[in-house]
Image (cartoon, rainbow, N blue to C red):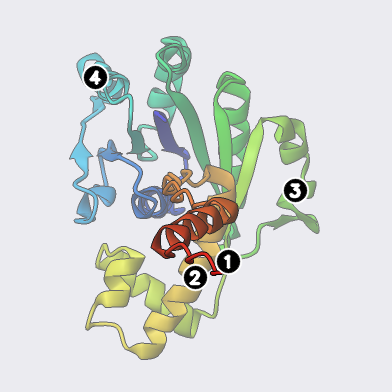
Amino acid sequence: MARAHFTLQGKGGVGKSLVSALIAQHRQENHVPLICVDTDPVNATFSGYTAFSVKRIELLKENTIDEREFDRLMELIAENRDAEVVIDNGASSFIPLSSYLVENEAIDMLQALGHSVVIHPVVTGGQSLLDTLSGFDALASQFPASAEMVVWLNHYFGPIEKEGKTFEKMKVFQDHQGRVKGIVTIDRYNQATFGEDVQQMLEDRMTFNQAIESEHFKLMSKHRLKIMKKSLFEQMDRVLGVPEKEKPIAAKPATAKPAAKAATATAEAAKKRKKPSSASKT
């Protein structure tokens, strides 16, 4: 199924490239044909992942969208009818790209060509909470209802709470609840152990599998990464879906000879072997 994933958020440094990498890992591990695109004009973080062969498209030119490059991105998505495309977008191009997608009715065009579109806003705790909530609100308000929305709650920088309310109880979520297809939570683990493992993996631009197989990570570090991967992938299984595996065609069972027919054949063979008895004399 053709699908385009846009990771969008107007605040920088909140984990957009991490989310793009997680989506790509999950789809790749489920053998989904995959194309990855990095459009961040400032930080080419997503391009640093060697596992995905990321394409680079420079969307922004002098703080405005380069129409030729935008058209190139749309054509790349449209031409790949059997693939999923993961697009990582930078904070500086968030407003221009979002506006351009809406103004050009690009979402409707892609859907008319048979592509579903998923918007992935990132909401994070700490000092960026209000900014990322505002970004989610803008995306949910501006994009057409036909675009699916998967919200990523990144607790790495702190709990996502406002006035004692969790994200699901906040007004901004309840206003757009009907737009949200699902939520993926990136939990805040112990920073001295899990935190260092993840930080090292991100700095090295490694996938979970690459880190787990790497000699640079020790036994317990690999074990902790496996725990995190399991938690995230199980959530993505539910939200993004897992392709159905083709069931093997069962071999047709050999036709057994009926018992009655076999018994009759045995009796006839015995009769042929038996000689007739001679008549008794008077």
Depth check, mark 3 against mark 4: the one in front is 3
Left or right: 191 in relation to 211: right
Say which residue appears at 45% left-offset and 37% top-offset.
8
Confirm or deny contact between disc 4 and disc 1 (CB under 8 A). no
* Residue 94 or residue 205, whichever sits in front: 205
Q: Where is residue 208? Give x, y as percent.
A: 35, 67
| Figure check: 189 above or below 40 | below
* Residue 248 or residue 26, whichever sits in front: 248
Distance from disc 2 to disc 1, alpha carbons, whole Å, reads: 9 Å
Distance from disc 3 to disc 4, alpha carbons, whole Å, reads: 37 Å
| Figure check: 245 above or below 113 | below
At label 3, counting other C-alpha atoms closer than 10 Å, the crowd grade (few under 14, some 14-19, many 20 or more) is few
Depth check, mark 3 against mark 2: the one in front is 2
Mark 4 lies on a secondary structure that is: loop
Distance from disc 4 to disc 2, alpha carbons, whole Å, reads: 38 Å
Say which residue appears at 37% left-offset and 81% top-offset.
222
Mark 3 lies on a secondary structure that is: helix
The amino acid type, in three-letter code, at marker 4 is Asp
Mark 1 lies on a secondary structure that is: loop
Distance from disc 3 to disc 2, alpha carbons, whole Å, reads: 22 Å
Confirm or deny contact between disc 2 and disc 1 (CB under 8 A). yes
Of the image marks 2 and 1, the number of the one nearer the N terminus: 1
At label 1, counting other C-alpha atoms closer than 10 Å, the crowd grade (few under 14, some 14-19, many 20 or more) is some
Kindly identify which residue carries mark 3.
Answer: 168
Q: Is residue 145 visible?
A: yes
The amino acid type, in three-letter code, at marker 1 is Asp
Q: In the drawing, what numbered circle is on residue 228? A: 2
Kindly identify which residue carries mark 1.
Answer: 187
Kindly identify which residue carries mark 4.
Answer: 66
